[in-house]
Amino acid sequence: MNGGAVSLKARALILGGADFFGLHLARRLVTEGYHVVVVDNLSRGRDRAEVAALGATPGVEVIAGDLTDPATWAALARGWAQIYLLPSAPLPKAIESDPVRAVRGQALAALHLIDWAAPGDKVFFASSGEVYADGVEDGVVQVPTEEAEPVLVGDLAEPRSAYAASRLFAEAALVHAARAGRSRIVVGRFYDLYGPRMGADHLIPQMCVRAVRGDDPFLVKGPHRKRAFCYVDDAVEATLRLMESPAAVGEIVHIGNDGAKSTSTIGDLARAVLRIAGVETRVVAEPAPTGSPARRAPDLAKLRRLTAFEPSVDLPDGLRRTFYWYRRTWASRRP
């Protein structure tokens, strides 16, 4: 795990990086001249072909390791220019079926990182706008949402609330570790990312795959729910800019797309995917998933102030890129 003869300033460590965002981040870091080491348990949601392709990429090394296991951390080399902690974001079904695993993964990964990291290490932690879900539903949190809005957790007996609490726990531990000088940490709260290589279990990939199949009827859960969607390349750009901003150390910053062309109801999103696919079908509404807030959108004022970031991919363009990738990829996998 020592990165060979590559200079220390060009070494990047991605912890939990064999999932959707980590795959895109790793490829971008390679283009920026980094040698990238990805550590991941290679379990749920990992596309074996994508992970294999990543591992075969010059400048990338993929290592199997469980971030909840102290032995994984003990085996890690030191001397990284950048460190990214991307603990797995379980699917709603997984959270419902095994909330303890979801909570445990977030908490232990953060605590192990704090104990392992050196004071000079530059660390990014991937959190989620999901931490505001209960507050939005209770009318306490404004949308679009600033970082200064209160976070609250509703009924801890609800798996999604428990998951949000675990994210907040990890955030608090890492931010206070940064302010105590134990490392240079910035926390990014992501809002509704999407793009190629996301698997087939999240909202937009599901719609793309079902459009490719020509599902009729085309079922849409919570069609009146409203979201601000962020294409993955924009999220990677914002993350890299935060890592280069000294003023971002110890801060919690929202990452997403707040543009009018990237905000849509779930129903309109489905119709947009079907138009791109050239499919005519009946769109049938179903109840929204339990715990899903009526609205979710970030206020990006803080991100702009720290990095001058502006999203560059609006929803119509991002949907086309994503759909064409899924059509090409999933068509090739059908018998």
Image (cartoon, grey):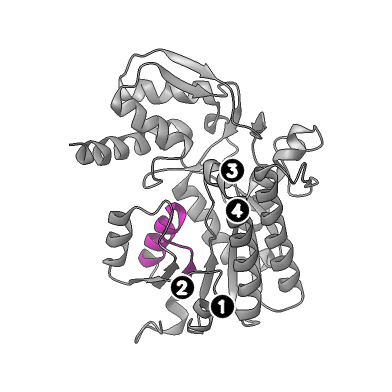
> Which residue corresponds to mark 1?
70
Circles 1 and 2 in contact, beta carbons < 8 Å: no
> Which residue corresponds to mark 2?
12
Quarter of the picture containing the C terminus is top left
How far is the residue under mark 3 from the one under mark 4? 38 Å
Badge 4 marks a residue whose secondary structure is: loop
> Which residue corresponds to mark 3?
96
Amino acid type of disc 2? Ala
Amino acid type of disc 4? Ala
How far is the residue under mark 3 from the one under mark 2? 34 Å
Is residue 24 located in the magenta-colored stretch of the structure? yes
Q: Which stretch did the figure color magenta?
A: 12-30
Badge 2 marks a residue whose secondary structure is: strand
Mark 4 or 2, nearer chain start: 2
Q: Is residue 217 visible?
A: yes
- Left or right relative to 57: residue 137: right
Image quarter of residue 265? top right
Amino acid type of disc 3? Glu
Q: Is residue 117 visible?
A: no
Mark 1 or 2, nearer chain start: 2
Q: Position of residue 320 (x, y in %)?
A: 36, 33
Q: Nearer the viewer, residue 94 or 309?
A: 94
**Figure check: 335 above or below 226:** below
Amino acid type of disc 1? Pro
Quarter of the picture containing the N terminus is bottom left
Image quarter of residue 43? bottom left
How far is the residue under mark 4 from the one under mark 2? 23 Å
How far is the residue under mark 1 from the one under mark 3? 27 Å
- Crowding around mark 1 (Cα neighbors within 10 Å: few <14, some 14 to 19, many 20+) is some
- Left or right relative to 140: residue 164: left
